[in-house]
Image: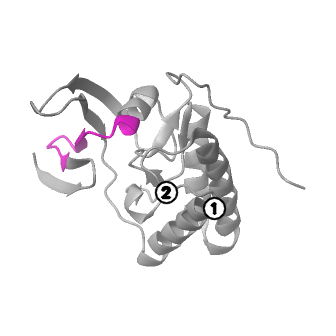
């Protein structure tokens, strides 16, 4: 490993010598979402090269299996400005609060609704505050078109390529259309008039 890029609630990421990232995660939603978009090219989402996953009973006293995922993905080197990172976090938290999304495993219909609301707000911000927000909104749409519903955009989950293109780099806290016992409705929810 060339560098430790950081850790979060469910895992840790390292920069590899070949300028890619390896993430070790126990976040099942991220493992499934990464598997869903593996190998696909997006303008505003970091490319997932390969995903390996296993479910094992790691501790003798544990009754449940714990998933461990290893995700190899594109390295996106540059952080956002403090102002843009702050505005992304505030916007996402506002949408999550409005939709009462506070658990680690979100309600599918609430997350779908929040994803669309967040995308709409970011498009509006893009018109007044700069193209970073429009690009992030596009990334949310790209993920949804690929079957991943995502609404956890904040400054730490978005980075800029060397060309200045914003990319979503962490897709934890998401749900997928495939593999769910209860199919989720991905099309835009009806608006209350």
Q: Is 1 located above or below residue 9 in the figure?
A: above
Q: Residues within 10 Å of mark 2 (few under 14, many from 20)?
A: few
User: What is the CA distance from the residue labelled 1 to the residue labelled 2?
Assistant: 21 Å
Residue 158 in picture, x, y percent from top left = 43, 57
Does the magenta segment cover residue 173?
no
Query: Which quarter of the image is occupied by the N terminus?
Result: top left
Q: Secondary structure at mark 2?
A: loop
Looking at the picture, the colour scheme in use is: one colour
Q: Where is residue 100, by image quadrant?
A: bottom right
The span shown in magenta is: 14-30
Q: Secondary structure at mark 1?
A: helix
Describe residue 149's horizontal placement relative to residue 28 as left or right.
right
Q: Circles 1 and 2: CB distance less than 8 Å?
A: no
Q: Which residue corresponds to mark 2?
A: 102
Is 40 or 13 nearer to us in this picture?
13
Query: Which quarter of the image is occupied by the C terminus?
Result: bottom right
Residue 55 in picture, x, y percent from top left = 24, 24
Q: Is 24 located above or below residue 116 in the figure?
A: above
Residue 4 in picture, x, y percent from top left = 15, 54
The circle drawn on residue 122 is 1
Describe residue 78's horizontal placement relative to residue 59 as left or right.
right
Q: Residues within 10 Å of mark 1 (few under 14, many from 20)?
A: many
Mark with earlier residue (1, 2): 2
Residue 33 in picture, x, y percent from top left = 43, 34
């Amino acid at each position: 490993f060339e560098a430790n890029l950081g850790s979060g609630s469910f895992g840790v990421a390292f920069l590899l010598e070949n300028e890619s990232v390896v993430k070790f995660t126990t976040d099942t939603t991220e493992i499934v979402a990464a598997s869903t978009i593996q190998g696909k090219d997006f303008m505003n989402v970091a490319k997932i090269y390969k995903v390996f996953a296993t479910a094992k009973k790691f501790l003798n006293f544990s009754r449940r299996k714990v998933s461990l995922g290893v995700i190899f993905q594109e390295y996106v080197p540059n952080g956002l400005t403090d102002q843009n990172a702050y505005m992304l976090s505030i916007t996402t938290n506002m949408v999550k609060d409005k939709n009462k999304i506070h658990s680690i495993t979100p309600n599918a219909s609430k997350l779908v609704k929040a994803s669309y609301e967040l995308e709409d707000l970011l498009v509006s911000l893009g018109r007044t505050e700069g193209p970073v927000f429009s690009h992030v909104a596009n990334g949310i749409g790209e993920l949804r078109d690929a079957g991943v519903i995502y609404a956890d955009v904040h400054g730490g989950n978005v980075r800029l390529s060397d060309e200045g293109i914003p990319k979503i780099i962490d897709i934890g806290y998401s749900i997928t259309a495939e593999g769910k016992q209860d199919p989720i409705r991905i099309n835009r929810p009806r608006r209350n008039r």
